[in-house]
Amino acid sequence: MLFSDLLFDSALTCTSAAYRTALVSLGIAVMATFFLCAMVFAHLLRSRRALQQSEARFRATFDQAAVGMAHVGLDGHWLHLNQRYCDLLGYSIDELRKLTFQDVTHPADVEADVALAGRLIAGELSTYSMEKQYIRKDGSLVWVALACSLVRKTNGEPDYFIALATDVSERRAAQDALRHERDFTSAILDTVCALVVVFDREGHIARWNRACERLTGYTFDEVKDVPVWDRLLLPEERAAVMHVFARIVDAQENTRGYENHWVGKDGARHLIAWSSTTLVDDGGRVAHVIGTGIDVTDQRRAEAHRARLYQEAEDAIRLRDEFLSIASHELKTPLTPIGLQVSHILRALRKDPASLPPDKLLPRLETIRRQVERLGSLVTELLDISSITAGRLRLEWEEVDLAAVARDVALRLGYEAARAGCKLDVRAQAPLPGRWDRARLDQIVTNLLSNAIKYGAGKPIDLVVEGDDSTARLLVRDRGIGIAPEHQARIFDRFERAVPDQQYGGFGLGLWIVKQILDALGGTIRVTSAPGSGATFLVELPRRPDQRGQVAA
């Protein structure tokens, strides 16, 4: 064999081995590829089945959902709807696909819905919800609770809306009915004049009517959820009201006629008479207390006024009876000696006229004169009280010398002072003119000097007139029984005196008349006294009262 043949055979042998190896490798690769393709195919098949199942579940969820579900284009057209949504609107799917959501939305709700959708597209909101009305195909309205979200493309651009709608017509109808009932009840409560306030079991104000607002000046928002005792009660009544309220809540004890004050925003106090009732929850616990109140402030004030008037009337009747008793006694006192003296004179004259010479007749006539003057003084006092009480006290203004009037009165009452053992010290020499009523000025001096003589206990009496350019002063001082401090204020009232009626005569009107005349003249009077040390009365009068705004009564 040639050498070349040997080489060829060797090469052929080597090539066949490599080829076989390559074929084996290729077969393995083909088988691996086959198995890989089979596995991929199986995975794709399972994924497709899963996708189909998922799509079927989504479709079932979409179509059979208990709420309306829809895909809505960005232009408002309906893309996909389930049957529930179609039932809500009363249209078929094909009919709705020709419409936009704006076409079937109540005009009052379109603007708000479009604005929210715009904010959703702009990315300002991730979702929004609202309650709105749709117009059904038959023209009727249906209330829905709408929830809306936005689906975006992979590049982030808006794609379509997902809308969920639930029929809430029954709830809205119930709410409207409840609102109507509440408005109706509120209208009734706001119409009534009585206060109506609802408290929770802790005493917080849960509701009240317009009458409460009008009375207190607080709006409901200012007192809502505020404990009533923190805002409206007097501090001194707070504990008592809290105790009563606790008894109402704990014992479910209704009250009637309980009264306490409310303090308004302006600080005004109002007395309220309350009636209360309780509302209990399902567990039997008190949930609310309803209080109905009436402002009895004016009523109680009127009752107090009537009681005061009744008491004043009783006092007036008592004073009248006392006055009539005093008046009858005082008027009879001068009449008795007058009658005795007249009877004695007449009896003597009838028996023997010569038995009553002038020296015997004059003292008797003097006694009669004094008693007649006293009687005239009493009658004058009665007339004065009638005029003053009726507001008919009249003043005759003229130029009067107070010093001269004081001297005249002292001279006129000199005999009476001498009989009482009182020495009169008159210091009224310098003229002191002013513009007054002469008769009323005389009455002031007479009453004060008569009192000093009556209560002076036979001791000296000072009568002093002095003054300056603007004011005249009259001082009457006795050194008699005096007046206790507790009586000094009331002696200027009608029928008042600081001594027993049985010991000293008179109506108890003199000082009251003096005070009324001085008020009309623009003057004042005050007393300084102590028991057993006498009394000093000081009168001050403006010399020109008309220049100070004084007007005759």
Image (cartoon, helix red, strand yellow):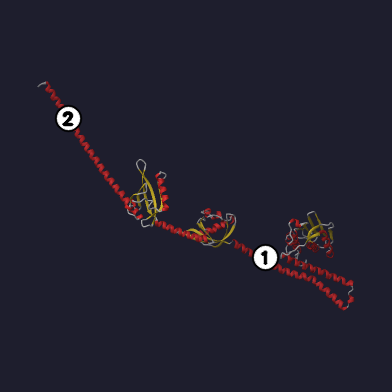
Is 458 left or right of 183, judged from the image as shown? right
Give the residue at x 28% y 47%: 53
Q: Is residue 474 left or right of residue 56?
A: right
Quadrant, the N terminus: top left
Q: Residues within 10 Å of mark 1 (few under 14, many from 20)?
A: few
Instruction: Report, in whole angstroms, how far the alpha carbon at label 2 lies from the one at label 1.
Output: 147 Å
* Residue ID for mark 2: 19
Query: Where, by quadrant of the figure, is residue 486 drawn?
Result: bottom right
Instruction: Name the residue rendered at 41%, 51% in the picture.
Output: 110
Q: Secondary structure at mark 2?
A: helix
Measured as percent of width and height from the top left, residue 166 is found at 37, 53
Q: Nearer the viewer, residue 26 or 523?
A: 523
Q: Is residue 394 visible?
A: yes
SS label for mark 1: helix
Residue sitting nearer the eye, 240 or 106 = 106
Quadrant for the C terminus, please. Answer: bottom right
* Residue 64, visible in the rendered structure: no
Residue holding disc 1: 312
Q: Earlier in the sequence, mark 2 or mark 1?
A: 2
